[in-house]
Image (spheres, rainbow, N blue to C red):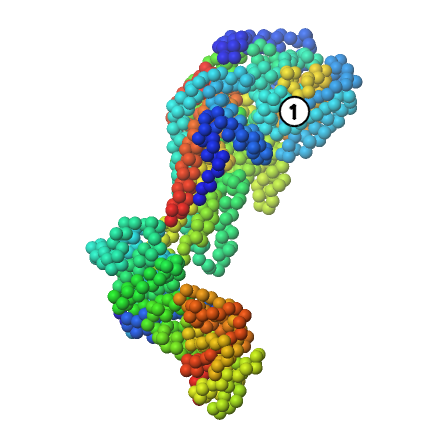
Amino acid sequence: MTNSQGRAPRPARSTRRQAAGRAVAALVIASLLSSTAYAQSVDLSQWSPEYIRSIAGTEEFDTAGHCASVVPLDYEGRLTYWWTGPTEASPQIEHQINEEFWAAWAETYPNIETDAQNIDYNQLLDRLRTTLLGNAGPMVVRLQILGGVEFASKGYFQELAPEDIGYPTADFWPGAMKSVTWQGTTYGVPTNNETMALIWNADIFERAGLDPESPPATWDDLVAYSKQIHDELGISGYGLVARQNAGNTPFRFMPQLWAYGGGALDEAEENPTYETVQLNSEGAVAALQAAYDMYVRDKSVPTSALTNTQNENQAPFIAGQLAMMIAHPSEYAKMVDLAGLATGADKEIADTVVENMRYGLIPEGPERRAVVFGGSNMHFVQPDYVEGGFDEQAAKAFACFWNSPEWSTKLAWTGSNPGNLAGFKTQWMKERLDTIKFLDVTTSMLPSGIPFPVIPEATEIMNIIVPDMLQNALTERMSVEEAAADAAAKVESLLGGGL
Amino acid sequence: MAEVVLKDVMKNYGSLYAVNNVSFTVEHGEFVALVGPSGCGKTTTLNLVAGLIPMSGGDISIGNRIVNDLDPKDRDIAMVFQNYALYPNKSVFKNLAFPLQMRKLPKAEIEAKVMQAAKILDITHLLERRPRELSGGQQQRVALGRALVRDPAVFLMDEPLSNLDAKLRVAMRSEIKRFHHNLNATVIYVTHDQLEAVTMADKMAVMHGGVLQQYDSPANVFANPVNTFVASFVGSPAMSLIPLDVVGKGTDVALKSPEEGWELPLSAQNARKATASSQGTVVLGARHSTLKLHKSPVAGSVPGKVYTVEPTGDVTFAQVFVSGAVVNVSLEPTAPIAPDEEVFVEFDQQRLHLFDGQTTNALKAA
Amino acid sequence: MSIATGRAAGPSTSQAASRASGILGRVIAHRTDYLYVLPALIVMLVVIAFPIYYTIELSFFRTPPNLQMRDKIWTGLDNYVTVLRSPVFHEVTINTIIWTVASTLVAFLLGLGAALSLHREFVGRGVMRALLLIPYVVSAVAASYVWKWLYHSDFGVIGAIAVQLGLTSEPINFLDNRQTVLASLIVVNIWKEFSFAMVMLMAGLQTVPEQLLRAAQVDGASAWNRFWHVTFPHLRGVSMVTVLLLMVANFNSFIIPFVMTGGGPADASHIWITHIYQLAFGRQQWGVASAYAVILFIVMMTLGYFYVKALTRGDENRAGG
């Protein structure tokens, strides 16, 4: 495929994907084999709530000491950094930790002049795109897990691997490493990873005649539970989210899709090549049918699901009008906040909800149990596109500091988990496990995590095509099969370079 | 055609009386002019007759019917406006037809009446044009036609000639007069131009400050004005008015100028009128045609000084200061007179007017 | 009245060379005038002319997600063909037409009714006028959010009231329903802009000649007839301007559909402008979005041409009368 600019033709798509596939395969094998080289810190094969508790607080780490071996502590330089930090909606503790971090950074590397910008989640991508066009980007940027591939594919990011900042690749989730690999090269370091879990209201379960302490085990069960709750109590069972052009939608639907054996491409496979479209596979159609059953047949989910994001589920949940939803670990803290704001009769209801809030594993399907592998990655921008030039030492020092076991853990306090798996051994991990409700459950979903396809077209597929497919089926504009086929055709066309 | 009777008609806006106790009768086929300066209430009166504004008091009857509470369309009137008020988006034909359309007459009848009116006013060749394509005079005729087509009991005309230039105004004046004559129409005609009123009307109603001053034929209004306002309003140039004191008694009465001291002896009849004055002061009124100018004093004349001389071609008007008042005298066009000349003004005792200096009403022999 | 200048006569009768120097001479003679205009001209070029040019240029390229913008691929008229052939384009066009025509017509009629009723004096007229102006001056974004919650399918106020009054058994689905979403949005749009029409027509009503209304009254016209034969024809100029302004505004109307439904569900409330926005900023398909924008631009220019023509035709009429 050549373009009119007359540059050397890029490798054809298939070879690009083959290269990616090979690289990932190599990584996985390496991570499974390595127990001595680079001293992999944790044993992924044993992952469970019990294992997590057993390793927490078992090791001490000297952050400053380690990073000094990468870049001397008295190094003089400058740094520019963009990320989405704590916002008004974030819990107080996150703001506190954020301040502690910057204070510690200044203390450890006092001679690095730092300009750090906390940019709103929805604006960060747009601002980065615009400034890169003008060669005025920051040196270092932290983006949500799927955000980086578009820039990597355009050649905006430098090669960067955990080893460059003194950490073994084996200490990072394979899925996370998948998400920072493009055409066989690694271009980032995972800073934190999280997965969502199923939340339910035990009180509602009981009143509807269900066992209050056990969540639906399979997706079929979830559909049945939702119907029962709606029939018995007249309220919504499951908080379906199907809004167009919104990130929340694929994060909740894809686990369902993968569980039934479907997928957008082959991202759920062990060694995906991102070549075959799977949106019209049997599994995908089954998942779509389940959503249809809930929305159209049973009417057991909110009618406003078509325009809802997860935000719109929070109020009904705390008001006891919604039984189940899929959300982040931090949702519990959010519910506590909301209950604190309630007054009068509402307060009683809200408090009951908080008391009865439960976390469990996301249901499994005939094929597997799956959840979207979420998180963020840190990237270095190519010098040509950085405003004022790139200071390599400063960037490395910073990346080492941020992604240390200590700070990787602290900075992911309420909403996520350390990308650097050594963090699971720190005393702070122990503190988190002791103080944060449900953390053991949400961390145990991590091995089931599947990242979205790591291709630049992924945003469009996940944010536009998949929600469109849902909406086409749920509004009965098309039949379930037609909607799936239509979506598959769109992805084919997109990958082939079309609209 | 019927008569119109106004009885004690009142219209007030709060404490402002726009029309104050006006009463007069318009006979069948009469052309009555409502005259007066701006703001005297003549247009308001017309609107009250038309029913466009509600009355505050009194009665109005048209053709022996009291119409106080009737809508304009039920009073059997037609109106011609100062700005013609033709419907700009309709053809002349449609303009004429509109009132009949509103009365829901059958199409054939409408057409017949429109053609008839158009013939009378000689506008048949204009029927397909729009108002903006017509000249002022033509528009005026269309406005008349629209009134005519309704075959009303009374035609109400609100200063219809004010928008025309002087020459056209003169021509249209005679046309309206012919119109009135041919149809024997009853017309109430509002104007601020006393010349129009005088030349066209059978009767004049002179109004001032909402009050009817005098209602009489133009000739009578001209010859026997009932007060100084009417006297100075009708006739052009206006009657000259000179305030003077009454001196003497019995038959030996004279008018003395308080400023210049001269005395003008009065005839017996005038003396009787003068002595009837309430405070011993009068206003002497004389029209320009009744005065003569002399270079030297004669009997019955008083001294004056020429202020300006206005030759108009037909006649020359001289304005002379007499006792501090300006007096208009008409002279032969070739009269040898110049400003600042000392002259003597001779009064015709038969044709001079005397008004009470205090009440301004015309004085009568006691 | 025209003033013939000796200068104007000169160059037009002499040869091309001296004609050129004539124009050049005039430009140089007036160079300070051009200097005064220069700042505004520069701003216009940067803010208006250049983006238009760049959009037109972009419309002939493809911008795949894996290439930087400067490496975009030339496709000639392919984007236009894609746009004009796609079924989504047809759907969105129909939506846009319905949206524009319905909003404009009803907003105009409502505004006319409001202007007429506010034309005569009554107690509280001033307050009424101010109240009716509120939708127009209120922030569109704020209003959209409030209406979104009024319409909400599960917890909306309108639905709740309907249930309480016993009109329906469950809350009404306005926005999550492909059949009703566009109409629901149109209602909000009308609510927002009818007072603009009201204000324009109120100004027009002031100019209806009083004598003409009196003449009609004397001629026996009822209130309706007076309106139809005198008032309304007189308002024609203002009405045309208002309708055209409303149409242009509605064609470009973005905030209400974007904030309330984002074009959903399933494209049922996408109008041209929201669709272009999604293509460009949601899906990074700059080339196709630009082609769309160029098509929209052409349609707007056509509408604008008729607008200016209608305006100046009114002037000619008045001058001739």
For disc 1, the marked residue is A82
Q: Residue at x 49, y 35 (%)?
A: C7
- Counting from the top left corner in percent of width and height, residue C81 is at 40, 21
Is residue A402 shown left or right of residue A271?
Answer: right
Q: Which of these two is toward me, C169 or C16?
A: C16
Task: Say above or below: A46 vs B121.
Answer: above
Q: Chain of mark 1?
A: A
Q: Quadrant of residue A64?
A: top right
Mark 1 residue element: strand
Q: Quadrant of residue A475?
A: top left
Q: Residue at x 73, y 21 (%)?
A: A78
Task: Say above or below: C240 vs C51.
Answer: below
Q: Residue flagged by tag 1: what amino acid is it?
A: Trp
Q: Residue at x 43, y 65 (%)?
A: B312
Task: Say above or below: A323 vs C199.
Answer: above
How dense is the environment of label 1, judged by Cα within 10 Å: few (below 14), some, or many (20 and up)?
Answer: many
